[in-house]
Amino acid sequence: MNSLAQTDSKAPNIKGLAGRLIAEGVLTSEQARDAQNDAKIMRVPLIRYLIDTLDVDSRELAEMASVEFGVPVFDLEAMNREMLPEPQIDTELMAKHHAVPLFRRGNRLFVAVSDPMNLGALDEFKFAAGINTDAVLVEDTALSKLLAELGEQSTGFDSDMASFSTDGEYDLEISDGPVEEDEENRDAADDTPIVRFVNKVLLDAIKQGASDIHFEPYEKDYRVRFRTDGILREVVKPPRNLAPRLAARLKVMCQMDISERRIPQDGRIQMKLSKNRAIDFRVNTLPTMYGEKIVLRILDPASAQLGIEALGYEEDQKALYLEALQKPQGMILVTGPTGSGKTVSLYTGLGILNEPERNISTAEDPVEINMAGINQVL
């Protein structure tokens, strides 16, 4: 045992791992007290402080933690890396808490930690994964090595996403709703690779005239598709292990419950391109075998204000539609495949009828485009 001190017979009532280290003669009571205080000030786990600052042996710490907390030490080095589950927790959160999900049994996720008292990690992982968590004690050096390997796997795509920009022609702002945020924290969040990647996908879809965006997880890959002119086409294939991060970002944007993955949810996003133009997205999630499929319907209010001339109707079609709009009663039935222009046609008709002397109410489920001067009933 590489002890830093002899047993301190006058040790104060220090409990936990620090107390065990004093009892075993690894630290004096003064060293233990200072280590606890310094680790707290530096906001690092005590074990990390002991290894990095006081050069305490990692294996020795794991063995003492095992005795102190009554749990065995799990050998990470002997574990086949291919047996690790598909990541449910992003690498940033793992690095923050110095912990890694190892395996799942039933409704419990077992998380590798070098400090069994790292309750913050267990709580955050429980929230992110949506299931209960248990700690698995591992040696800190082996855990650091595994975290580095996982970080390298995601670095390539994170770097690609970090290079994405939203182009200078737009003054981009995502409106999440009425919730107020700290400006500094929001700016920091908007600088992350996942956030910028999602923003880039949404902007590309708008530029290319897409009507829908599909985010789709599968067993071994993940793809994003745009529907343009009624045809779906693949535009990008992010790494499969980013599926939870992409789903979480989209759900946060439209204020969905990010912990609910078992039932479909509906939401809405507004993207402000400039002071005078905003695009709405209707968002739907659908639980599948391999994660949540998320579809965004793009709703541009400006498209309903272009007038009937912009709809591409033949002259006889335009005449029939205008005639039907002027009748005092009746029904106009608009049918067609996705992206064929049904919504824009109906809202264009409402725009034609929307005059100060008329009282217009609609029954919509959901309301797709907000129109001033019309009572849109939810």
Image (cartoon, rainbow, N blue to C red):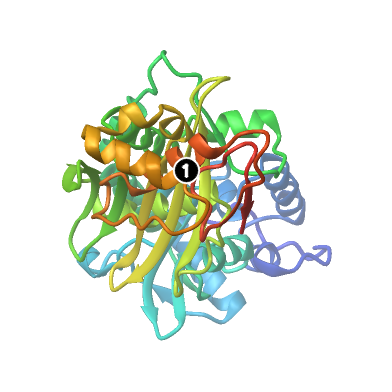
Is the C terminus in the top left, top right, bottom left or bottom right quadrant? Answer: bottom right
Neighbour tally class for label 1: few under 14, some 14-19, many 20 plus, Cα within 10 Å: few
Residue closer to the observer: 108 or 299: 299
Q: What residue sits 51% from the left and 57% below the top? A: 366
The residue tagged with tag 1: helix, strand or loop? loop
Q: As drawn, which residue projects farthest toward the top?
A: 168
Front in this rendered view, residue 311 or 39 = 311
Q: Is residue 86 visible?
A: yes
With respect to residue 159, does 349 lie above or below?
below
Image spot of residue 86 (x, y percent): 30, 64
At 28% from the left and 73% from the top, the residue drawn is 289
- Residue at mark 1: 326
Q: Position of residue 275 (x, y in %)?
A: 58, 20
Residues 341 and 53: in front is 341
Q: Amino acid at mark 1?
A: Gln
Q: Position of residue 180 (x, y in %)?
A: 72, 40
Q: Quadrant of residue 74?
A: bottom left
